Image: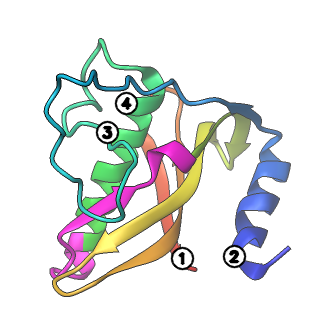
């Protein structure tokens, strides 16, 4: 096990998680025009900006959108050169948990690859997000690959 996976592996083991599959992504019909390319690497699906509060959106996508929004806001506070975060949704691990950190209930863990887009470059990072009972973001963490 490499050092990049030690923290997520220990966290998963400590929380006793069950992995949930992500919902299938609808494929466009041949008559549809191609969508605009998202920032970051080619391919993949990004959560919609308003998905965190939309009641008709899949709960996993709501949590992913909330994690992305919270992480982006915090990164921009520290480094104004950060323009966006591209989360590789197709490669994410979305897990449920029934654990506590101190007195705080942890109900979801999201782990995967994220690309932090800056003025002149973007870099691959491991992404970790913990969510609470109502889908609220408790913690986000990035580490370079």
The answer to whether marks 3 and 4 mark residues whose Cβ atoms lie closer than 8 Å is yes
At horizontal 54% and vertical 76% (from top left) the residue drawn is 143
Alpha carbons under labels 3 and 4: distance apart: 8 Å
Q: Position of residue 25 (x, y in %)?
A: 43, 27
Secondary element under disc 1, as helix, strand or loop, is: strand
Give the residue at mark 1.
143
Alpha carbons under labels 4 and 1: distance apart: 23 Å
Alpha carbons under labels 4 and 2: distance apart: 26 Å
The answer to whether marks 2 and 1 mark residues whose Cβ atoms lie closer than 8 Å is yes
Q: Which residues are magenta?
A: 76-91
Image quadrant containing the N terminus: bottom right
Q: Position of residue 22 (x, y in %)?
A: 55, 30
Q: Is residue 102 magenta?
A: no
- Mark closer to the chain start, 3 or 4: 3
Image quadrant containing the C terminus: bottom right
- Mark closer to the chain start, 3 or 2: 2
- Numbered label attached to residue 4: 2
Secondary element under disc 2, as helix, strand or loop, is: helix
At horizontal 46% and vertical 74% (from top left) the residue drawn is 124
> Badge 4: few (under 14), some or many (20 or more) residues near its Cα, within 10 Å?
many
């Amino acid at each position: 096990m490499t050092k990049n996976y030690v923290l997520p592996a220990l966290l998963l083991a400590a929380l006793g998680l069950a992995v949930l599959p992500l919902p299938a992504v609808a494929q466009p019909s041949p008559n549809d025009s191609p969508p605009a390319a998202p920032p970051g690497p080619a391919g993949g699906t990004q959560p919609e900006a308003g998905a965190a509060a939309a009641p008709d959106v899949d709960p996993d996508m709501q949590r992913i959108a909330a994690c992305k929004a919270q992480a982006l806001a915090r990164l921009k506070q520290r480094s104004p050169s950060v323009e966006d975060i591209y989360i590789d949704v197709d490669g994410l691990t979305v897990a449920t948990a029934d654990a506590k950190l101190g007195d705080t209930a942890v109900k979801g863990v999201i782990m995967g690859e994220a690309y932090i887009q800056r003025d002149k470059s973007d870099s691959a990072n491991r992404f970790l997000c913990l969510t609470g009972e109502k889908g609220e973001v408790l913690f986000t963490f990035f580490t370079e690959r």
